[in-house]
Amino acid sequence: MFTRSDGFDLAVTLNQIRNNIKDGSPILINDLSDYGKLYKSIWEYAVYTSEPSKCAFDSHCAHPQWVKSNSIVYLVGIGYKEISGKGYFWTLSHDSVDIFFNKAHQGLINLNPRIIGCSGFGDCGKVREKAIDLVYYLQAYDLLKAGGGLPNGDQDKNGGNCTARNKLREFARNLYKQSDDIINSWSGWKKNHGIICASALGMAAIVLNDAGTETSFLVGVWGWIGDLFGEDDGVEFAPYYSPIKWNELGQGGFSENLFVGHHWKLFGLVSDDVPQAYTGSPLLWGAPYSNNVDHNPYAEGPSYAKYGLFDCGIPAMIAQKNLYPEFLRAALRNSPMVWCFSPTTFNPAY
């Protein structure tokens, strides 16, 4: 969630965020800083809105944003009120902070991990909506971890299928199953929708990076048999339950959809080769590679770029940069600039 650099210190960073929010407090409401205005909206949503109903399997809803808002208040630990036209920020007590943790944690436990199948046309668009939900939930979970409210290591692994962590594992497993046809589509699905799905899978692989392929051999075998015969038996462990697989499809899909863009030509003319998402080398997302086929990389206006690249793609890239050691980060930072300014950059097909 944070943009880390060498010497990153969470406590120092949080104090700077708090100071930015409180700047000038008490202050006229209309004169709040951008930080203050943003936090005010988060606070009011977390405080004055009851937990929304969990999302259906085929649509986006307000529940993920509510969970994320409560997790932000929990970690930042600042309250807000208005008196006589002025805005006041204050530091919350431990008991008050715990209230927001409990709401966010229970919201994660209550989430619906089911996702509609991508059978073509509108249903694939609904998978994209569920991917955005997963991004918000993962960010909320990461914030609860950062604040120390959730345990690390084995204590958080095998607490039952309805723990926050295992709900997210099941959600990621389902997205992995349903997003392959979007990420590897030969048509326009692969652009914004492919970037969103790839970003969610990559972020899941990072946030849940210690989630092994199976926690029980017998359960894993049973899940593999069930999936082999097309049964949805509620066993989320195998064969799609693997952060390694999520990362392979995520990083390959992200690079392919954003920077490379193998694509069918317009007007029914097919390129020489329309490969699947590249899941081998390079290690980092956004490290372009090329061959002698048609390329149609990403380009969008403000609206599509916001919900495709800025809301999902950039957070996923930041998460990856934070995970990798410094010597591997340069390619991730440099590749987008190379792609944007290279004289050989290809134009998108639509």
Image (cartoon, rainbow, N blue to C red):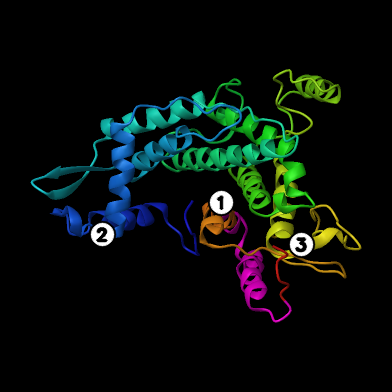
**Residue drawn at x 68%, y 32% as measured from the top left:** 174
Q: Quadrant of the C terminus?
A: bottom right
Q: Label 1's element?
A: helix
Residue type highlighted by circle 3 = Pro
Whole-percent x and y of residue 62?
45, 34
Task: Report the Cα–Cα distance between label 3 and label 2.
Answer: 41 Å
Tell which circle, 1 or 2, labels the residue nearer the N-terminal end.
2
The disc placed on residue 312 is 1
Specify whether residue 330 is painted magenta: yes
Observer-nearest of 348 and 89: 348
Q: Are marks 3 and 2 in contact (CB under 8 Å)?
A: no
Which residue corresponds to mark 2? 33
Whole-percent x and y of residue 281?
79, 60
Q: Tell me if mark 3 has few (under 14), some (14-19) or many (20+) residues whose alpha carbon lies within 10 angstroms of its own.
A: some
Residue 6 in view of the camera: yes
Q: Label 3's element?
A: loop
Magenta segment boundaries in residue numbering: 320-344
Q: Tell me if mark 2 has few (under 14), some (14-19) or many (20+) residues whose alpha carbon lies within 10 angstroms of its own.
A: some
Circle nearer the viewer, 1 or 3: 1
Q: Is residue 331 above or below residue 25?
A: below
Which residue corresponds to mark 3? 282
Q: How many marks?
A: 3
Whole-percent x and y of residue 56?
56, 26
Observer-nearest of 16 and 271: 271
Q: Is residue 232 above or below residue 154?
A: above
Examine the image and state in which quarter residue 296 appears: bottom right
Magenta segment, principal secondary structure?
A: helix
**Residue drawn at x 38%, y 56% as measured from the top left:** 13
Q: In the drawing, does residue 191 fall left or right of residue 79?
A: right
Residue 210 in view of the camera: no
Residue type highlighted by circle 2 = Ser
Examine the image and state in which quarter residue 330 appears: bottom right
